Amino acid sequence: MLRCQVPCLITLSKHTCPTPNIESDIRNYKRSKLIVKKPTDCRYVSNSPEQSTSSERTLDQTLISFKYLRLIKKAIREFGPIVEKNKKLEYLLQKAKEHNLPPDYIDYVQRICVDSRSTVGLLELLLFHNCHFIVQYEDIDLSLTKHHLLKLCERADAFIIQNNIKWPQNFDQKGIILVKNDSTCSTFKNLKETEIVASNVGAVTVSQDIDPEGFPYWKFLCEPCDLHEVKKHLIEKGCLIEEAFVGYIPKQKVTLPYRARNHARQVIMELNKIPCIDNVYTNIM
């Protein structure tokens, strides 16, 4: 049954201005890629082929895909789109290839992040059992994002929240900083030492976790307005930061029956088939 409504929760943000050298690389990159300048041209905006629907694909693989697509954008915005000049980008593209990310998706994020028309925003989805998804996207033509999500809602018996922002009821907005913590780049000896450092640099909490690839990391949370300051202090202490962004932490996680939980996870995997979606936050246990 189709219960979708036209989404209206849209928050826009501008990207950090690149340096003059990077701007020159971006101009050359656009010319080499022949980016179409018509904002309604679906060939560029959101027309990548869908990923395989094989049952072999797991939630971890989906999260890895989200991760590397975000990191590729970050590397391009920091150091430019020319692979020969950007070793970080070269490394990430190789990792994305190893994890079998679709080439069309990689090409899409490489193009979208150098296009000044792109905007970042949020959309909210509600499923059964009070399952709440916050979908973060970056796109040029929002109507195509809506189109993809409406099709997904029809299949998943979900709907897009209209008129009222609902996420403050179920989520806290926080600055999130992910710091690598493997044998090659462990800055802190244990959790106690890390908690002391977190307090000193202005973070609210810190926890240890494992990413979808199986690598350990420290997760620092802070107030959104303190994100850049906390990140700067952690870098000064020698931390290798993988990601730093404003995200959403569930106030309370929802425990679902087995079948419902699998269905919700399938929705996350379906969202990864929409190339303009960067991340998904959920309150599912």
Image (cartoon, rainbow, N blue to C red):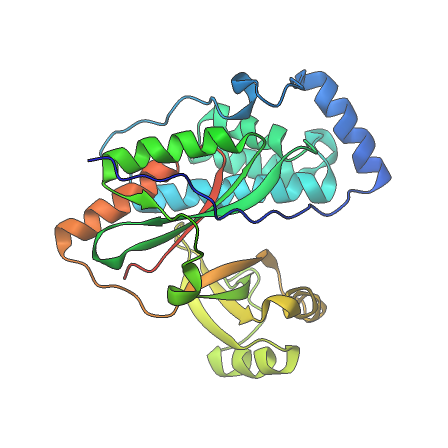
Kindly identify the residue that appears in the image at 59 percent across and 31 percent down.
140
Kindly identify the residue that appears in the image at 61 percent across and 31 percent down.
112
**Residue 154 position within the rendered picture, expressed as x and y whole percent measured from the top left:** 26, 34
Would residue 198 be visible to someone looking at this image?
Answer: yes
Q: Is residue 179 above or below residue 109?
A: below
Q: Quadrant of the N terminus?
A: top left
Kindly identify the residue that appears in the image at 44 percent across and 69 percent down.
208
**Residue 206 position within the rendered picture, expressed as x and y whole percent measured from the top left:** 49, 74
Please name whichever residue, 49 or 86, is drawn nearer the observer in this view of the structure. 49
Tell me: 251 left or right of 12: left
Kindly identify the residue that appears in the image at 73 percent across and 36 percent down.
80
Would residue 56 be visible to someone looking at this image?
Answer: no
Q: Quadrant of the C terminus?
A: bottom left
**Residue 152 position within the rendered picture, expressed as x and y whole percent measured from the top left:** 31, 34
Residue found at the far front of this picture: 163
Please name whichever residue, 140 or 81, is drawn nearer the observer in this view of the structure. 140
**Residue 262 position within the rendered picture, expressed as x and y whole percent measured from the top left:** 20, 48
Q: Is residue 4 above or below residue 228?
A: above
Please name whichever residue, 162 or 182, is drawn nearer the observer in this view of the structure. 162
